[in-house]
Image: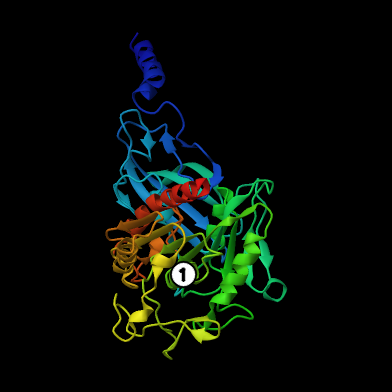
C-alpha cells in the first residue's frame, strides 16, 4: 500500500509540479525578425519560472570580421516572461528599461585602435541567446536591413563620369516626384553617409551620399574644398527620375554642417532646406596643422576663423555663417555633453540668428543633456560608431537614447517638408 502511495505521489509531482514554474521550453519571440535597422523591435522571452533571473546576450559580426556583443540580466515577471519593452536590465552593458538596449550597447570583443562598427553590406544578423546557470537554453536570430527590399541597391557614381564621388539610392517608384537629400559627413572624410542615405531612401526619400575629401581624385585633407563640387552633385541629384527638383535638402554632419549651411546661403536656387547635425555656426579654418581656409567659392576662400571654440570670432567676424539667407526649413541637433566642439552653443547661435532676422521658414533644434558628438549620426539601435571611451561623449548611453528620439523626429521633419 505504501509503495502504491509513493508511486501515485511521484506521478502527481510529474504532472502538476511544472504548472508551478515553467511548463514550456524557454523561447525568444521577436515581432519583426527581419526589418529595417532603424525599426524598434518587441522582444520577449517566455517559458521561465516566475521571478527567475536570466542572462540575455546579443552578438553580431561586422564587415571587418570583428565580433560585437552585449548582455543584460533580467528578472522574469510572475508569468515567467521577460518583455524587453518593460523589463529593466539589472546589469550588463546597459541598465534600466530600453527595448533596444542590447543593440546599441554592443561592444567589440577584441578592442583595437579603430573600434567603430562597420556594417556588412545590406544586412546584418544579430543572434540572441538566453542563459540559465551558465547553459544556453534558447537562441533566436534577427536580420537588420539597411534598405527596403523593394528599393534598388545603391549605385556608385565616379568622379570621372559625373564630377563627384558618391553613391545614389533611388526611390522604388520613379513615377512620383519626391523630396531628395544630399548627404555628407565631416572630418572623418571619405564616403561616410551611405547607411543614412540607404535608410532615407527606404523611407521614401531618394538620397545621394558623397565624399568631398580623402577619397580617390579628391583633396587628401579637409582644406580648400570648393562649394562648386557640392553644387554639381546637387544639380545631378535634381535631374534624377523621381526627384522633385524644387524640394532638395542638404544634410551635413559636424564639419560638414558648415558646408550644408553655406550651400543654403550661397545656392538658394539649388537648396530648399538644410539638415545640420552637431553643427557650427562659424566657418572654421583648416585643422590640418596649416591654418587656412576649408571652404572655397569662385576660387576664393570664404571667410573663416582660426580661433575655434568661440561663437563670435574676433579674428574674423564675417566667419559667422549668414544662416538667415537660407531659403527653406532648417533641422539641427546637438549633444550638451559633446566633447568634440560646442555643438549646442553653436546650434543655439544659429537659432538666435534666424529668429533675430525673422527667418520665415520652420527651424528645429533638438538638444540632449549628456549626449555627445555621436548624435551627429542619428540612426538608432546601432552599435556605438564613435567607440566607447573615445572622449567624444560624457555618457554613451545618453547618446544612444538621444538617437532613438532624433531619428523619428528627423523623418517627421522630412514628412512635413514633403507637404510644402
Badge 1 density bin: few <14, some 14–19, many ≥20, Cα 10 Å: some
Residue 42, horizontal then vertical, whole percent: 44, 38
How many numbered dots are placed on residues in this image?
1
Figure quadrant of residue 50: top left
On screen, residue 8 above or below 309: above
Asked if residue 151 shows in the view, the reply is yes
Instruction: Pick out the residue farthest to the right.
Output: 161
Residue 265, horizontal then vertical, whole percent: 46, 69
Figure quadrant of residue 362: bottom left
- In the picture, measured across the screen, residue 240 lies left or right of residue 276, that is right
Instruction: Pick out the residue farthest to the bottom.
Output: 290
Residue 215, horizontal then vertical, whole percent: 59, 77
Query: Of residues 200 and 50, which is closer to you in this image?
Result: 200
Query: Of residues 132 and 145, which is closer to you in this image?
Result: 145
Point 51% across, 86% down: residue: 300
Query: Of residues 172 and 328, which is closer to you in this image?
Result: 328
**Please, what secondary structure does the residue beneath circle 1 have?**
helix
Q: Which residue is mark 1?
A: 265
Point 35% across, 59% down: residue: 399
Point 32% across, 44% down: residue: 97
- In the picture, measured across the screen, residue 337 lies left or right of residue 378, that is left
Figure quadrant of residue 8: top left
On screen, residue 413 above or below 31: below
Residue 348, horizontal then vertical, whole percent: 30, 64
Asked if residue 116 shows in the view, the reply is no
Point 46% across, 58% down: residue: 328
Amino acid at each position: 500500500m505504501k509503495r502504491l502511495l509513493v508511486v501515485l505521489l511521484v506521478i502527481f509531482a510529474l504532472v502538476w509540479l511544472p504548472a508551478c514554474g515553467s511548463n514550456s521550453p524557454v523561447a525568444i519571440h521577436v515581432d519583426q525578425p527581419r526589418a529595417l535597422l532603424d525599426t524598434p523591435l518587441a522582444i520577449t522571452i517566455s517559458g521561465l519560472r516566475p521571478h527567475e533571473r536570466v542572462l540575455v546576450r546579443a552578438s553580431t559580426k561586422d564587415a571587418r570580421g570583428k565580433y560585437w556583443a552585449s548582455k543584460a540580466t533580467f528578472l522574469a515577471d510572475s508569468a515567467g516572461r521577460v518583455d524587453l519593452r518593460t523589463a529593466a536590465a539589472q546589469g550588463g552593458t546597459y541598465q534600466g528599461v530600453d527595448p533596444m538596449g542590447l543593440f546599441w550597447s554592443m561592444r567589440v570583443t577584441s578592442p583595437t585602435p579603430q573600434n567603430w562598427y562597420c556594417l556588412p553590406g545590406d544586412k546584418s544578423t544579430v543572434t540572441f541567446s538566453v542563459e540559465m546557470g551558465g547553459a544556453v537554453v534558447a537562441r533566436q536570430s534577427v536580420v537588420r536591413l539597411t534598405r527596403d527590399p523593394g528599393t534598388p541597391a545603391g549605385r556608385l557614381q565616379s568622379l570621372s563620369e559625373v564630377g563627384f564621388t558618391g553613391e545614389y539610392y533611388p526611390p522604388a517608384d520613379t513615377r512620383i516626384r519626391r523630396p531628395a537629400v544630399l548627404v555628407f559627413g565631416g572630418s572623418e572624410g571619405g564616403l561616410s553617409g551611405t547607411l543614412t542615405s540607404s535608410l532615407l531612401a527606404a523611407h521614401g526619400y531618394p538620397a545621394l551620399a558623397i565624399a568631398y575629401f580623402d577619397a580617390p581624385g579628391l583633396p587628401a585633407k579637409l582644406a580648400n574644398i570648393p562649394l562648386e563640387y557640392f553644387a554639381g552633385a546637387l544639380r545631378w541629384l535634381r535631374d534624377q527620375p523621381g526627384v522633385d527638383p524644387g524640394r532638395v535638402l542638404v544634410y551635413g554632419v559636424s564639419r560638414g554642417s558648415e558646408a550644408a549651411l553655406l550651400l543654403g546661403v550661397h545656392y538658394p536656387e539649388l537648396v530648399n532646406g538644410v539638415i545640420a547635425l552637431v553643427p557650427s555656426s562659424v566657418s572654421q579654418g583648416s585643422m590640418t596643422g596649416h591654418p587656412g581656409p576649408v571652404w572655397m567659392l569662385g576660387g576664393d576662400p570664404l571667410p573663416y576663423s582660426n580661433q575655434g571654440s568661440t561663437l563670435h570670432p574676433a579674428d574674423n567676424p564675417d566667419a559667422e555663417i549668414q544662416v538667415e539667407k537660407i531659403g527653406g526649413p532648417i533641422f539641427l541637433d546637438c549633444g550638451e555633453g559633446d566633447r568634440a566642439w560646442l555643438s549646442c552653443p553653436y546650434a543655439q547661435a544659429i537659432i538666435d540668428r534666424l529668429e533675430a532676422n525673422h527667418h520665415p521658414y520652420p527651424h528645429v533644434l533638438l538638444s540632449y543633456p549628456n549626449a555627445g558628438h555621436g548624435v551627429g549620426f542619428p540612426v538608432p539601435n546601432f552599435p556605438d560608431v564613435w567607440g566607447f571611451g573615445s572622449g567624444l561623449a560624457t555618457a554613451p548611453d545618453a547618446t544612444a537614447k538621444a538617437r532613438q528620439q532624433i531619428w523619428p523626429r528627423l523623418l517627421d521633419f522630412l514628412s512635413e517638408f514633403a507637404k510644402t
